[in-house]
Image (cartoon, rainbow, N blue to C red):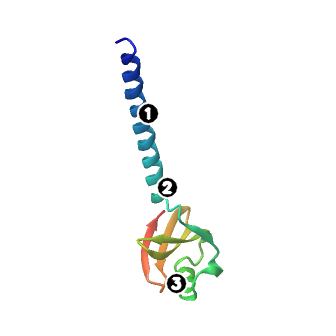
Amino acid sequence: MKRKRPTIIGLVAGIGLVLCMGTIALIAGCAMFEKGDNAEKISMDQLPLVVKAAAEKETAGCKIIEVEKELKDGKVIYAVTYDEKGKEMEIEYSEDGTLLFKGPE
């Protein structure tokens, strides 16, 4: 009977460890997805012409911080992060130049 206790305790500890590791991996995966880690950094010149024209008009006089091409809900989105009077802002466009989002980063 003495041998069964360490085996059961070890089994319970092992299951607990696996569950903890799985939870950590899930949380990390969700955080990466929310940050848009599927995003590809590109330059303004790589934007579709209609998106580039709209972004340049919207960010006139501002410093461009980052331009990304990302996939959201199966659709390509172009995100431009810029500095507007010391505040980090972001605009997002669809491939056809439709403004999808404008606000703080």
Q: Which mark is residue 17?
A: 1
Question: Could you tell which of marks 3 and 2 lies nearer the N-terminus?
Answer: 2
Between 45 and 69, the residue placed more toward the observer is 69
Nearer to us of marks 2 and 1 is: 1
Contact flag, marks 3 and 2 (Cβ < 8 Å): no
Q: CA distance from mark 3 to mark 1?
A: 51 Å
According to the image, label 2 marks what residue?
Answer: 32
Residue 4: x %, y % from top left = 37, 18
Q: Looking at the picture, does residue 15 appear above or below residue 90?
A: above
Q: Residue 46 appears in which quarter of the rendering?
A: bottom right
**Could you tell me which residue is drawn at 46 percent across and 46 percent down?**
25
Question: Which one is earlier in the sequence, the residue at label 3 or at label 1?
Answer: 1
Relative height, residue 68 to residue 53 (above, below): above
- Asked if residue 76 is positioned above or below residue 12 in the image, the reply reads below
Q: Considering the numbered disc 3 on the image, is that residue within a helix, a strand or a loop? A: helix
Residue 95 location in percent, x, y?
49, 83
- Residue 87, position in %: x, y? 52, 62
Name the residue nearer the viewer: 37 or 78: 37
The label nearer to you, 3 versus 2, is 2
| Residue sitting at the far top | 2
Q: Residues within 10 Å of mark 3 (few under 14, many from 20)?
A: some
Quarter occupied by residue 8:
top left
Mark 3 sits on what residue?
Answer: 54
Residue 11, horizontal then vertical, whole percent = 39, 28
- Please tell me which residue is depicted at 45% across the width and 58% down the height of the picture: 34
